[in-house]
Image (cartoon, rainbow, N blue to C red):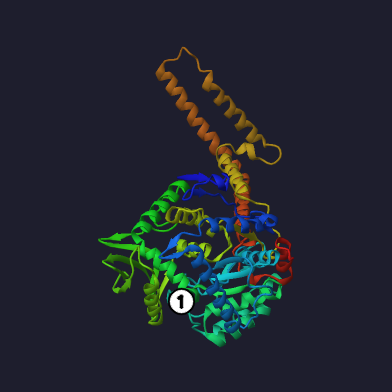
Protein backbone atom coordinates (compact mmCIF):
# COMPACT_ATOMS: atom_id res chain seq x y z
CA UNK A 1 0.00 0.00 0.00
CA UNK A 2 1.31 3.46 -0.92
CA UNK A 3 0.09 6.77 0.39
CA UNK A 4 1.13 10.42 0.29
CA UNK A 5 2.93 12.12 3.15
CA UNK A 6 -0.12 14.19 4.09
CA UNK A 7 -1.86 11.69 6.38
CA UNK A 8 -1.59 11.98 10.14
CA UNK A 9 0.93 9.48 11.60
CA UNK A 10 -1.85 7.93 13.71
CA UNK A 11 -3.75 7.12 10.53
CA UNK A 12 -0.87 5.27 8.85
CA UNK A 13 -0.76 1.50 9.18
CA UNK A 14 2.64 -0.13 9.81
CA UNK A 15 4.31 -1.08 6.53
CA UNK A 16 2.68 1.63 4.43
CA UNK A 17 5.01 3.09 1.83
CA UNK A 18 4.68 6.84 2.29
CA UNK A 19 5.73 8.77 -0.78
CA UNK A 20 7.42 12.04 0.10
CA UNK A 21 8.32 14.89 -2.23
CA UNK A 22 11.32 16.92 -1.16
CA UNK A 23 12.43 20.08 -2.94
CA UNK A 24 16.11 20.93 -3.00
CA UNK A 25 16.67 24.43 -1.59
CA UNK A 26 18.01 26.46 -4.52
CA UNK A 27 18.49 30.00 -3.24
CA UNK A 28 21.79 30.94 -1.65
CA UNK A 29 21.47 30.63 2.13
CA UNK A 30 18.23 28.67 1.98
CA UNK A 31 17.55 25.42 3.78
CA UNK A 32 15.11 22.54 3.98
CA UNK A 33 14.38 21.68 7.61
CA UNK A 34 11.46 19.31 8.11
CA UNK A 35 9.83 19.55 10.53
CA UNK A 36 10.65 23.22 11.12
CA UNK A 37 13.61 23.87 13.41
CA UNK A 38 11.46 25.10 16.31
CA UNK A 39 9.31 21.94 16.06
CA UNK A 40 12.08 19.41 15.50
CA UNK A 41 12.54 18.47 19.15
CA UNK A 42 8.90 17.27 19.28
CA UNK A 43 9.96 14.18 17.32
CA UNK A 44 11.74 12.83 20.40
CA UNK A 45 8.65 12.17 22.61
CA UNK A 46 6.73 10.87 19.58
CA UNK A 47 9.49 8.36 18.88
CA UNK A 48 9.81 7.36 22.52
CA UNK A 49 6.11 6.46 22.47
CA UNK A 50 6.63 4.33 19.37
CA UNK A 51 9.64 2.58 20.90
CA UNK A 52 7.60 1.88 24.03
CA UNK A 53 4.83 0.36 21.91
CA UNK A 54 7.35 -1.83 20.07
CA UNK A 55 9.48 -2.68 23.10
CA UNK A 56 8.31 -6.31 23.34
CA UNK A 57 9.22 -7.24 19.74
CA UNK A 58 11.27 -10.44 19.89
CA UNK A 59 14.72 -10.19 18.29
CA UNK A 60 16.18 -13.73 18.49
CA UNK A 61 15.25 -14.08 22.14
CA UNK A 62 15.84 -10.50 23.23
CA UNK A 63 13.21 -7.80 23.41
CA UNK A 64 13.75 -4.84 21.14
CA UNK A 65 13.96 -2.53 24.17
CA UNK A 66 16.73 -4.64 25.72
CA UNK A 67 18.68 -4.85 22.47
CA UNK A 68 18.23 -1.13 21.87
CA UNK A 69 19.59 -0.22 25.33
CA UNK A 70 22.57 -2.50 24.79
CA UNK A 71 23.22 -1.07 21.32
CA UNK A 72 23.13 2.50 22.62
CA UNK A 73 25.52 1.69 25.47
CA UNK A 74 27.97 -0.03 23.13
CA UNK A 75 27.74 2.76 20.55
CA UNK A 76 28.43 5.49 23.11
CA UNK A 77 31.36 3.60 24.61
CA UNK A 78 32.86 2.93 21.17
CA UNK A 79 32.26 6.50 20.00
CA UNK A 80 33.84 8.03 23.09
CA UNK A 81 36.88 5.79 22.67
CA UNK A 82 37.27 6.69 18.99
CA UNK A 83 36.66 10.40 19.49
CA UNK A 84 39.04 10.79 22.42
CA UNK A 85 41.73 8.19 21.67
CA UNK A 86 41.95 8.20 17.87
CA UNK A 87 40.87 11.76 17.03
CA UNK A 88 42.16 13.08 20.37
CA UNK A 89 39.17 15.38 20.73
CA UNK A 90 37.22 15.89 23.94
CA UNK A 91 33.66 14.54 24.02
CA UNK A 92 30.98 17.18 23.55
CA UNK A 93 29.95 18.90 26.77
CA UNK A 94 26.88 17.76 28.67
CA UNK A 95 25.47 14.54 29.99
CA UNK A 96 25.78 11.22 28.18
CA UNK A 97 22.34 10.17 29.47
CA UNK A 98 20.00 12.29 27.32
CA UNK A 99 18.19 11.37 24.11
CA UNK A 100 20.50 10.23 21.31
CA UNK A 101 20.47 12.66 18.33
CA UNK A 102 22.01 10.85 15.38
CA UNK A 103 23.12 11.72 11.87
CA UNK A 104 25.53 10.08 9.47
CA UNK A 105 27.25 10.13 6.11
CA UNK A 106 30.17 8.71 4.17
CA UNK A 107 33.53 10.07 5.40
CA UNK A 108 34.17 12.30 2.40
CA UNK A 109 34.79 16.03 1.96
CA UNK A 110 31.09 16.51 1.38
CA UNK A 111 29.22 19.66 0.41
CA UNK A 112 27.68 22.17 2.79
CA UNK A 113 24.17 20.81 2.26
CA UNK A 114 25.34 17.57 3.88
CA UNK A 115 27.46 19.36 6.48
CA UNK A 116 24.39 21.29 7.64
CA UNK A 117 23.06 18.02 9.10
CA UNK A 118 26.00 17.83 11.49
CA UNK A 119 25.20 21.23 12.96
CA UNK A 120 21.55 20.31 13.20
CA UNK A 121 22.51 17.17 15.16
CA UNK A 122 24.85 19.04 17.52
CA UNK A 123 22.60 22.01 18.18
CA UNK A 124 19.43 19.97 18.56
CA UNK A 125 21.33 18.01 21.21
CA UNK A 126 22.19 21.30 22.92
CA UNK A 127 18.54 22.35 22.92
CA UNK A 128 17.28 19.00 24.26
CA UNK A 129 20.13 18.07 26.64
CA UNK A 130 20.76 15.19 24.28
CA UNK A 131 23.83 13.30 23.09
CA UNK A 132 24.97 14.18 19.53
CA UNK A 133 26.34 11.24 17.52
CA UNK A 134 27.68 11.12 13.98
CA UNK A 135 27.80 7.73 12.25
CA UNK A 136 30.69 7.51 9.79
CA UNK A 137 29.38 5.21 7.07
CA UNK A 138 32.78 3.82 6.11
CA UNK A 139 31.47 0.56 4.64
CA UNK A 140 30.50 2.52 1.53
CA UNK A 141 32.86 2.65 -1.44
CA UNK A 142 35.56 5.28 -1.93
CA UNK A 143 34.72 6.41 -5.46
CA UNK A 144 37.10 9.32 -6.01
CA UNK A 145 40.39 10.67 -4.66
CA UNK A 146 39.97 14.23 -5.95
CA UNK A 147 38.10 17.38 -5.04
CA UNK A 148 36.45 19.70 -7.57
CA UNK A 149 37.19 23.43 -7.41
CA UNK A 150 36.05 26.36 -9.59
CA UNK A 151 38.56 28.04 -11.91
CA UNK A 152 38.35 30.81 -14.51
CA UNK A 153 36.31 33.97 -14.13
CA UNK A 154 32.70 34.84 -13.41
CA UNK A 155 32.01 35.09 -17.15
CA UNK A 156 33.71 31.80 -18.01
CA UNK A 157 33.94 29.64 -14.88
CA UNK A 158 34.82 25.95 -15.09
CA UNK A 159 35.53 23.01 -12.82
CA UNK A 160 38.83 21.26 -12.33
CA UNK A 161 39.84 18.39 -10.06
CA UNK A 162 42.66 18.38 -7.52
CA UNK A 163 43.85 15.02 -6.18
CA UNK A 164 43.95 14.57 -2.43
CA UNK A 165 45.68 11.19 -2.70
CA UNK A 166 47.27 8.82 -5.17
CA UNK A 167 45.36 6.05 -6.97
CA UNK A 168 43.25 3.66 -4.91
CA UNK A 169 41.63 0.34 -5.66
CA UNK A 170 37.86 0.55 -5.62
CA UNK A 171 37.24 -0.48 -2.03
CA UNK A 172 35.29 0.52 1.09
CA UNK A 173 36.42 3.62 2.95
CA UNK A 174 37.31 1.62 6.04
CA UNK A 175 40.05 -0.17 4.06
CA UNK A 176 41.51 3.01 2.51
CA UNK A 177 45.00 3.86 3.74
CA UNK A 178 46.58 7.07 2.45
CA UNK A 179 48.58 6.07 -0.63
CA UNK A 180 50.74 9.18 -1.14
CA UNK A 181 51.54 11.27 1.93
CA UNK A 182 53.14 14.06 -0.13
CA UNK A 183 50.02 14.52 -2.28
CA UNK A 184 47.82 14.47 0.80
CA UNK A 185 49.99 16.97 2.67
CA UNK A 186 49.95 19.46 -0.22
CA UNK A 187 46.18 19.50 -0.77
CA UNK A 188 45.59 22.61 1.34
CA UNK A 189 48.21 24.61 -0.53
CA UNK A 190 47.17 23.43 -4.00
CA UNK A 191 43.46 24.10 -3.42
CA UNK A 192 44.21 27.54 -1.97
CA UNK A 193 46.38 28.42 -4.96
CA UNK A 194 43.71 27.13 -7.34
CA UNK A 195 41.11 29.42 -5.75
CA UNK A 196 43.38 32.48 -5.52
CA UNK A 197 41.88 34.22 -8.57
CA UNK A 198 38.48 34.41 -6.81
CA UNK A 199 39.89 36.72 -4.16
CA UNK A 200 39.08 34.90 -0.91
CA UNK A 201 40.79 32.52 1.52
CA UNK A 202 39.20 29.07 1.79
CA UNK A 203 38.81 27.15 5.05
CA UNK A 204 41.17 24.44 3.87
CA UNK A 205 44.09 26.85 4.08
CA UNK A 206 43.67 27.05 7.86
CA UNK A 207 42.33 23.61 8.83
CA UNK A 208 44.14 21.12 6.61
CA UNK A 209 47.04 20.76 9.03
CA UNK A 210 44.66 18.84 11.33
CA UNK A 211 44.02 16.29 8.57
CA UNK A 212 47.77 15.96 7.90
CA UNK A 213 48.55 15.44 11.58
CA UNK A 214 45.83 12.78 11.90
CA UNK A 215 47.13 11.07 8.75
CA UNK A 216 50.56 10.79 10.37
CA UNK A 217 48.99 9.06 13.37
CA UNK A 218 46.85 6.40 11.70
CA UNK A 219 47.48 6.69 7.96
CA UNK A 220 43.75 6.31 7.20
CA UNK A 221 41.64 8.60 5.02
CA UNK A 222 38.59 8.05 7.23
CA UNK A 223 40.38 9.30 10.33
CA UNK A 224 42.01 12.26 8.59
CA UNK A 225 38.78 13.54 7.03
CA UNK A 226 36.81 12.95 10.23
CA UNK A 227 39.44 14.73 12.34
CA UNK A 228 39.51 17.91 10.25
CA UNK A 229 35.73 18.10 10.08
CA UNK A 230 35.12 17.32 13.76
CA UNK A 231 37.80 19.76 14.92
CA UNK A 232 36.25 22.54 12.81
CA UNK A 233 32.77 21.81 14.17
CA UNK A 234 34.05 21.97 17.74
CA UNK A 235 35.74 25.29 17.08
CA UNK A 236 32.33 26.54 15.90
CA UNK A 237 30.59 25.27 19.04
CA UNK A 238 28.97 22.17 17.51
CA UNK A 239 30.88 19.07 18.60
CA UNK A 240 29.54 15.52 18.23
CA UNK A 241 30.71 12.05 19.14
CA UNK A 242 32.13 10.24 16.10
CA UNK A 243 31.41 6.56 15.45
CA UNK A 244 32.76 4.68 12.42
CA UNK A 245 30.27 1.99 11.48
CA UNK A 246 33.16 -0.43 11.00
CA UNK A 247 33.90 -0.20 14.72
CA UNK A 248 30.26 -0.47 15.75
CA UNK A 249 29.77 -3.64 13.70
CA UNK A 250 32.27 -5.45 15.91
CA UNK A 251 29.99 -5.01 18.95
CA UNK A 252 27.52 -7.67 20.15
CA UNK A 253 24.25 -5.71 19.84
CA UNK A 254 24.49 -4.79 16.13
CA UNK A 255 25.75 -8.31 15.38
CA UNK A 256 22.67 -9.65 17.20
CA UNK A 257 20.51 -7.47 14.95
CA UNK A 258 22.40 -8.77 11.92
CA UNK A 259 21.90 -12.37 13.03
CA UNK A 260 18.17 -11.75 13.45
CA UNK A 261 17.79 -10.50 9.88
CA UNK A 262 19.90 -13.39 8.55
CA UNK A 263 17.84 -15.95 10.47
CA UNK A 264 14.68 -14.62 8.83
CA UNK A 265 16.28 -14.23 5.39
CA UNK A 266 13.45 -15.82 3.39
CA UNK A 267 10.75 -13.58 4.80
CA UNK A 268 13.05 -10.56 4.72
CA UNK A 269 13.87 -11.07 1.05
CA UNK A 270 10.18 -11.24 0.12
CA UNK A 271 9.32 -8.08 2.09
CA UNK A 272 12.43 -6.26 0.84
CA UNK A 273 11.72 -6.96 -2.83
CA UNK A 274 8.03 -6.09 -2.56
CA UNK A 275 8.89 -2.74 -0.91
CA UNK A 276 11.53 -1.88 -3.52
CA UNK A 277 9.20 -2.74 -6.40
CA UNK A 278 6.39 -0.73 -4.85
CA UNK A 279 8.75 2.21 -4.46
CA UNK A 280 9.67 2.02 -8.16
CA UNK A 281 6.02 2.08 -9.16
CA UNK A 282 5.16 4.95 -6.81
CA UNK A 283 8.14 7.03 -7.99
CA UNK A 284 8.00 5.94 -11.65
CA UNK A 285 11.47 4.41 -11.60
CA UNK A 286 11.98 2.05 -14.53
CA UNK A 287 15.46 0.73 -13.82
CA UNK A 288 15.60 -2.52 -11.87
CA UNK A 289 18.92 -1.39 -10.36
CA UNK A 290 17.52 1.77 -8.75
CA UNK A 291 17.17 2.87 -6.08
CA UNK A 292 18.55 -0.51 -5.00
CA UNK A 293 18.50 -3.87 -6.82
CA UNK A 294 16.12 -6.64 -5.83
CA UNK A 295 17.57 -9.38 -3.65
CA UNK A 296 18.29 -12.45 -5.77
CA UNK A 297 17.64 -16.13 -5.22
CA UNK A 298 19.99 -18.81 -6.58
CA UNK A 299 18.54 -22.27 -6.00
CA UNK A 300 18.12 -22.47 -2.21
CA UNK A 301 20.48 -19.54 -1.57
CA UNK A 302 18.86 -16.19 -0.75
CA UNK A 303 20.65 -12.90 -1.09
CA UNK A 304 20.69 -10.89 2.16
CA UNK A 305 20.92 -7.07 2.31
CA UNK A 306 24.54 -7.09 3.52
CA UNK A 307 28.02 -6.69 2.04
CA UNK A 308 30.84 -9.11 2.72
CA UNK A 309 34.57 -8.97 2.01
CA UNK A 310 37.86 -9.96 3.62
CA UNK A 311 40.80 -7.83 4.71
CA UNK A 312 43.45 -7.93 2.01
CA UNK A 313 40.80 -8.46 -0.67
CA UNK A 314 38.61 -5.37 -0.17
CA UNK A 315 36.10 -5.93 -2.96
CA UNK A 316 32.60 -5.66 -1.56
CA UNK A 317 30.58 -8.71 -2.53
CA UNK A 318 26.96 -9.77 -2.14
CA UNK A 319 26.08 -12.09 0.72
CA UNK A 320 23.97 -15.22 0.19
CA UNK A 321 22.55 -17.45 2.93
CA UNK A 322 20.64 -20.72 3.17
CA UNK A 323 19.23 -22.75 6.03
CA UNK A 324 20.53 -26.31 6.35
CA UNK A 325 19.11 -27.95 9.44
CA UNK A 326 20.11 -25.95 12.51
CA UNK A 327 22.86 -24.10 10.62
CA UNK A 328 22.74 -20.97 8.51
CA UNK A 329 25.33 -21.23 5.75
CA UNK A 330 26.86 -18.07 4.29
CA UNK A 331 28.73 -17.45 1.04
CA UNK A 332 29.68 -14.63 -1.28
CA UNK A 333 29.59 -14.85 -5.07
CA UNK A 334 32.78 -16.93 -5.17
CA UNK A 335 33.10 -19.13 -2.09
CA UNK A 336 31.52 -20.45 1.09
CA UNK A 337 32.43 -18.41 4.13
CA UNK A 338 31.12 -20.62 6.90
CA UNK A 339 28.04 -21.44 8.96
CA UNK A 340 26.28 -19.86 11.91
CA UNK A 341 24.50 -21.91 14.62
CA UNK A 342 21.24 -20.12 13.95
CA UNK A 343 17.67 -20.52 12.81
CA UNK A 344 14.50 -18.45 13.24
CA UNK A 345 13.70 -19.65 16.75
CA UNK A 346 17.19 -19.93 18.21
CA UNK A 347 18.94 -17.39 20.43
CA UNK A 348 21.64 -15.44 18.59
CA UNK A 349 24.19 -15.86 21.40
CA UNK A 350 26.27 -18.52 19.64
CA UNK A 351 25.89 -16.87 16.22
CA UNK A 352 27.20 -13.56 17.59
CA UNK A 353 30.22 -15.37 19.04
CA UNK A 354 30.99 -16.87 15.61
CA UNK A 355 30.51 -13.50 13.89
CA UNK A 356 33.00 -11.96 16.31
CA UNK A 357 35.49 -14.74 15.52
CA UNK A 358 35.09 -14.05 11.83
CA UNK A 359 35.74 -10.36 12.49
CA UNK A 360 39.04 -11.27 14.17
CA UNK A 361 39.90 -13.40 11.13
CA UNK A 362 39.45 -10.38 8.84
CA UNK A 363 35.94 -10.95 7.52
CA UNK A 364 33.77 -7.87 7.15
CA UNK A 365 29.98 -8.19 7.23
CA UNK A 366 28.30 -4.83 6.77
CA UNK A 367 24.81 -3.54 6.17
CA UNK A 368 23.72 -2.10 2.84
CA UNK A 369 21.86 1.21 2.45
CA UNK A 370 18.39 0.29 3.76
CA UNK A 371 19.56 -1.98 6.56
CA UNK A 372 22.13 0.64 7.66
CA UNK A 373 19.47 3.21 8.47
CA UNK A 374 17.16 0.47 9.80
CA UNK A 375 19.81 -0.38 12.40
CA UNK A 376 20.67 3.27 13.13
CA UNK A 377 17.08 4.36 13.64
CA UNK A 378 15.73 1.33 15.51
CA UNK A 379 18.77 0.49 17.68
CA UNK A 380 20.39 3.88 18.29
CA UNK A 381 18.59 7.12 17.55
CA UNK A 382 15.89 8.85 19.52
CA UNK A 383 15.74 11.04 16.44
CA UNK A 384 17.68 10.52 13.22
CA UNK A 385 18.47 13.48 10.96
CA UNK A 386 18.62 12.65 7.27
CA UNK A 387 19.70 14.58 4.22
CA UNK A 388 17.57 14.65 1.09
CA UNK A 389 18.88 11.39 -0.37
CA UNK A 390 18.55 9.46 2.86
CA UNK A 391 15.06 10.80 3.49
CA UNK A 392 13.94 9.58 0.08
CA UNK A 393 15.51 6.14 0.60
CA UNK A 394 13.84 5.80 3.97
CA UNK A 395 10.44 5.71 2.35
CA UNK A 396 11.51 2.11 1.82
CA UNK A 397 13.11 1.68 5.25
CA UNK A 398 9.90 2.79 6.96
CA UNK A 399 7.92 0.22 5.02
CA UNK A 400 10.52 -2.48 5.69
CA UNK A 401 10.41 -1.90 9.45
CA UNK A 402 6.62 -1.86 9.50
CA UNK A 403 6.17 -5.04 7.45
CA UNK A 404 9.00 -7.01 9.07
CA UNK A 405 8.38 -6.07 12.71
CA UNK A 406 4.75 -4.96 12.52
CA UNK A 407 5.39 -1.63 14.26
CA UNK A 408 5.31 2.03 13.33
CA UNK A 409 8.84 3.20 12.49
CA UNK A 410 10.34 6.12 14.41
CA UNK A 411 9.96 9.49 12.70
CA UNK A 412 13.02 11.21 11.30
CA UNK A 413 13.98 14.78 10.42
CA UNK A 414 15.28 16.02 7.08
CA UNK A 415 17.88 18.76 6.77
CA UNK A 416 19.72 20.20 3.78
CA UNK A 417 21.02 23.62 2.79
CA UNK A 418 22.39 25.49 -0.19
CA UNK A 419 25.29 27.89 0.24
CA UNK A 420 27.12 29.31 -2.78
CA UNK A 421 30.80 30.05 -2.98
CA UNK A 422 31.63 33.79 -3.32
CA UNK A 423 32.25 33.61 -7.07
CA UNK A 424 30.13 36.62 -8.03
CA UNK A 425 26.44 37.14 -8.63
CA UNK A 426 24.80 34.59 -10.94
CA UNK A 427 23.51 35.74 -14.30
CA UNK A 428 19.77 36.34 -14.75
CA UNK A 429 19.59 33.79 -17.58
CA UNK A 430 17.59 30.61 -16.92
CA UNK A 431 16.39 27.64 -18.96
CA UNK A 432 13.33 29.74 -19.75
CA UNK A 433 15.58 32.47 -21.15
CA UNK A 434 17.42 30.00 -23.36
CA UNK A 435 14.10 28.55 -24.55
CA UNK A 436 12.88 32.02 -25.52
CA UNK A 437 16.09 32.71 -27.46
CA UNK A 438 15.77 29.41 -29.31
CA UNK A 439 12.15 30.20 -30.14
CA UNK A 440 13.09 33.65 -31.48
CA UNK A 441 15.81 32.17 -33.67
CA UNK A 442 13.54 29.46 -35.03
CA UNK A 443 10.79 31.98 -35.75
CA UNK A 444 13.29 34.34 -37.42
CA UNK A 445 14.24 31.65 -39.93
CA UNK A 446 10.63 31.72 -41.20
CA UNK A 447 9.57 35.25 -40.32
CA UNK A 448 12.72 37.38 -40.07
CA UNK A 449 10.70 40.58 -40.42
CA UNK A 450 9.28 40.05 -36.90
CA UNK A 451 12.72 40.42 -35.34
CA UNK A 452 14.04 43.51 -37.16
CA UNK A 453 15.51 46.29 -35.03
CA UNK A 454 14.14 49.65 -36.07
CA UNK A 455 12.31 50.48 -39.31
CA UNK A 456 12.19 47.98 -42.14
CA UNK A 457 14.22 48.84 -45.27
CA UNK A 458 12.20 49.43 -48.46
CA UNK A 459 13.21 46.02 -49.86
CA UNK A 460 11.86 44.32 -46.77
CA UNK A 461 8.66 46.39 -46.83
CA UNK A 462 8.06 45.34 -50.45
CA UNK A 463 8.69 41.63 -49.79
CA UNK A 464 6.56 41.59 -46.62
CA UNK A 465 3.67 43.25 -48.46
CA UNK A 466 3.91 40.68 -51.25
CA UNK A 467 4.10 37.87 -48.69
CA UNK A 468 0.87 39.08 -47.04
CA UNK A 469 -0.88 39.23 -50.41
CA UNK A 470 0.11 35.66 -51.23
CA UNK A 471 -0.97 34.42 -47.80
CA UNK A 472 -4.33 36.16 -48.25
CA UNK A 473 -4.96 34.14 -51.43
CA UNK A 474 -5.18 30.96 -49.31
CA UNK A 475 -8.77 31.76 -48.27
CA UNK A 476 -9.83 33.84 -51.27
CA UNK A 477 -9.18 31.58 -54.25
CA UNK A 478 -11.74 31.76 -57.05
CA UNK A 479 -14.30 28.99 -56.31
CA UNK A 480 -14.85 28.41 -60.05
CA UNK A 481 -11.32 27.04 -60.52
CA UNK A 482 -10.92 23.35 -61.20
CA UNK A 483 -8.96 21.08 -58.94
CA UNK A 484 -6.00 21.11 -61.38
CA UNK A 485 -6.09 24.89 -61.54
CA UNK A 486 -6.22 25.12 -57.72
CA UNK A 487 -3.17 22.85 -57.44
CA UNK A 488 -1.29 24.91 -60.00
CA UNK A 489 -2.17 28.12 -58.19
CA UNK A 490 -1.14 26.65 -54.82
CA UNK A 491 2.15 25.46 -56.33
CA UNK A 492 2.88 28.90 -57.78
CA UNK A 493 2.04 30.54 -54.43
CA UNK A 494 4.24 28.15 -52.42
CA UNK A 495 7.17 28.63 -54.76
CA UNK A 496 6.90 32.39 -54.53
CA UNK A 497 6.59 32.30 -50.72
CA UNK A 498 9.74 30.18 -50.50
CA UNK A 499 11.56 32.65 -52.71
CA UNK A 500 10.33 35.58 -50.59
CA UNK A 501 11.48 33.80 -47.43
CA UNK A 502 14.92 33.21 -49.03
CA UNK A 503 15.24 36.85 -50.03
CA UNK A 504 14.10 38.03 -46.60
CA UNK A 505 16.64 35.66 -45.03
CA UNK A 506 19.43 37.19 -47.10
CA UNK A 507 18.36 40.70 -46.12
CA UNK A 508 17.98 39.60 -42.49
CA UNK A 509 21.45 38.03 -42.07
CA UNK A 510 22.37 40.70 -39.47
CA UNK A 511 19.17 39.84 -37.58
CA UNK A 512 19.96 36.13 -37.59
CA UNK A 513 23.56 36.78 -36.51
CA UNK A 514 22.27 38.89 -33.63
CA UNK A 515 19.80 36.21 -32.53
CA UNK A 516 22.46 33.51 -32.80
CA UNK A 517 24.72 35.65 -30.66
CA UNK A 518 22.00 36.23 -28.07
CA UNK A 519 21.38 32.49 -27.87
CA UNK A 520 25.11 31.78 -27.51
CA UNK A 521 25.39 34.36 -24.72
CA UNK A 522 22.35 32.98 -22.92
CA UNK A 523 23.69 29.41 -23.12
CA UNK A 524 27.15 30.50 -21.95
CA UNK A 525 25.67 32.37 -18.98
CA UNK A 526 23.45 29.42 -18.11
CA UNK A 527 26.55 27.20 -18.17
CA UNK A 528 28.35 29.75 -15.98
CA UNK A 529 25.48 29.67 -13.49
CA UNK A 530 25.88 25.92 -13.12
CA UNK A 531 29.29 26.65 -11.61
CA UNK A 532 28.42 29.90 -9.81
CA UNK A 533 25.35 28.32 -8.18
CA UNK A 534 26.77 24.82 -7.68
CA UNK A 535 25.74 23.46 -4.29
CA UNK A 536 28.05 20.42 -4.35
CA UNK A 537 31.32 22.19 -3.57
CA UNK A 538 33.09 20.76 -0.52
CA UNK A 539 32.79 22.64 2.75
CA UNK A 540 36.58 23.12 2.88
CA UNK A 541 36.41 25.49 -0.12
CA UNK A 542 34.34 28.17 1.64
CA UNK A 543 35.55 31.28 3.47
CA UNK A 544 35.16 30.68 7.19
CA UNK A 545 33.40 33.89 8.21
CA UNK A 546 30.63 33.68 5.60
CA UNK A 547 30.02 29.98 6.04
CA UNK A 548 29.99 30.14 9.81
CA UNK A 549 27.55 33.08 9.81
CA UNK A 550 25.21 31.14 7.51
CA UNK A 551 25.35 28.00 9.66
CA UNK A 552 24.71 29.98 12.86
CA UNK A 553 21.71 31.64 11.23
CA UNK A 554 20.18 28.32 10.13
CA UNK A 555 20.92 26.44 13.37
CA UNK A 556 21.17 28.92 16.26
CA UNK A 557 23.04 27.90 19.39
CA UNK A 558 21.15 27.53 22.64
Residue depicted at x 51% and y 70%: 71
User: Residue 5 appears at what percent x and percent y?
Assistant: 55, 47
Closest to the observer, 371 or 255: 255
For residue 356, above or below residue 471: below
For residue 523, above or below residue 117: above
User: Residue 144 appears at what percent x and percent y?
Assistant: 49, 72
Dot 1 falls on a residue whose secondary structure is loop
User: Residue 474 appears at what percent x and percent y?
Assistant: 52, 22
Q: Is residue 131 visible?
A: yes
User: Residue 140 appears at what percent x and percent y?
Assistant: 47, 70
Q: Which residue is mark 1?
A: 250
Q: What is the quadrant of the N terminus in the image?
A: top left
Q: What is the quadrant of the C terminus in the image?
A: bottom right
Check disc 1: other Cα within 10 Å, few if <14, some if 14-19, many if 20+.
many
Give the total number of marks visible in the rendering: 1
For residue 160, above or below residue 20: below
Residue depicted at x 32% and y 70%: 332
- Please state if 394 lies on the left or on the right of 213 as rendered: left
Residue 468 quadrant: top right
- Please state if 514 lies on the left or on the right of 490 as rendered: right
Residue 503 quadrant: top right
Amino acid sequence: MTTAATASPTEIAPGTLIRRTWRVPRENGSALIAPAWEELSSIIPHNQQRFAAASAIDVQGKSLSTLRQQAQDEALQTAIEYTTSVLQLPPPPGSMNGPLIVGGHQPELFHTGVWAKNFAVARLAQHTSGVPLQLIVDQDTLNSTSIKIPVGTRDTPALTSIDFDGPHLRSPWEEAAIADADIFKSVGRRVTEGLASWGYRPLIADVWLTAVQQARCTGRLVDAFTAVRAATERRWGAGTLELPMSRWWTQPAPLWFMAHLLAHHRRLAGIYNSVVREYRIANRVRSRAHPVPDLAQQDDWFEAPFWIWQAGDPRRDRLFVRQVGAELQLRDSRRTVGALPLDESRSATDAVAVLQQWTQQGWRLRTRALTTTWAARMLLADVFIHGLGGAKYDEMTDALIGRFWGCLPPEFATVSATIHLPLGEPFPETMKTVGARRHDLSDALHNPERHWDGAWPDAVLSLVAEKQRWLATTNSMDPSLTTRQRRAENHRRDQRLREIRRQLGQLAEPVLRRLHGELDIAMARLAANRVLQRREFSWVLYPEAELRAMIDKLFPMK
